[in-house]
């Protein structure tokens, strides 16, 4: 099995693979990762095993939660393993409507050089393009991503 560095694996999952699968599979992805507590972790393990890449994390390091943003709109919050390097995410958010037409994938990225309390809010579109929404305190990031941006 191929072993990626912690940072390589996280970056690829957070910024490339998960958004691509979210945009491609939409409701199938949402149902699959919210079925039970370790569904997201198990899905990642299966996918990595198929690609012969070693999983470097444990199940409890990933937490997935679903919230209703407003009538007809929802957000899946994916908490990632503790960020240790620049561009690693504290969490990402998959936003969607009931018809899975309005899809957005946001990341809340840390940078130890800037400081642990300041995060970058970014967005990845279905073509893999990166949009920067600026910085804010970590304590405000979740609300800003869910209600604003």
Image: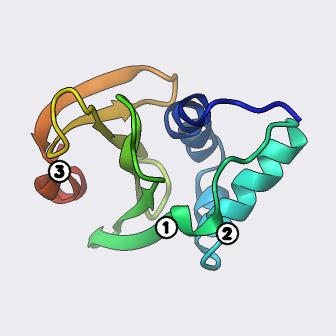
Q: Nearer the viewer, residue 27 or 108?
A: 108
Q: Nearer the viewer, residue 15 or 71?
A: 15
- The residue under the point 45% across, 64% down is 98
Q: Residues within 10 Å of mark 2 (few under 14, many from 20)?
A: some
- Specify whether 23 is left or right of 53: left
Q: Position of residue 108 (x, y in %)?
A: 30, 43
> Please, what secondary structure does the residue beneath circle 2 have?
helix
**Residue 112, relative to residue 47: is it above or below?**
above
Disc number for residue 138? 3
- Specify whether 109 is left or right of 138: right
The nearer-to-camera label among 3 and 2 is 3
Give the total of numbered labels.
3
**Which sits earlier in the primary sequence, circle 3 or circle 2?**
2
**Which sits earlier in the primary sequence, circle 1 or circle 3?**
1
For marks 2 and 1, give the CA distance.
Answer: 9 Å
Q: Is residue 13 visible?
A: yes
**Figure quadrant of residue 70:** bottom left
- Specify whether 32 is left or right of 146: right
Marks 1/3 in contact by CB < 8 Å: the verdict is: no
Which residue has dot 1 on it? 64
């Amino acid at each position: 099995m191929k072993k990626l560095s912690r940072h390589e694996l996280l970056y690829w999952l957070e910024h490339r693979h998960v958004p691509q699968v979210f945009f491609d599979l939409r409701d199938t992805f949402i149902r699959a990762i919210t079925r039970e507590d370790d569904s997201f972790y198990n899905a990642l393990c299966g996918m990595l095993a198929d690609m012969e890449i070693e999983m470097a994390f444990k199940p409890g390091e990933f937490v997935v939660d679903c919230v209703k943003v407003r009538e007809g709109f929802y957000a899946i919050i994916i908490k990632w393993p503790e960020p240790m390097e620049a561009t690693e995410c504290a969490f990402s958010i998959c936003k969607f409507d009931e018809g899975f037409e309005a899809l957005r994938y946001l990341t809340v990225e840390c940078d130890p050089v800037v400081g642990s309390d300041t995060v970058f809010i970014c967005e990845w579109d279905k073509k893999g393009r990166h949009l920067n929404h600026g910085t804010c305190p970590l304590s405000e990031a979740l609300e800003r991503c869910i209600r604003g941006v």
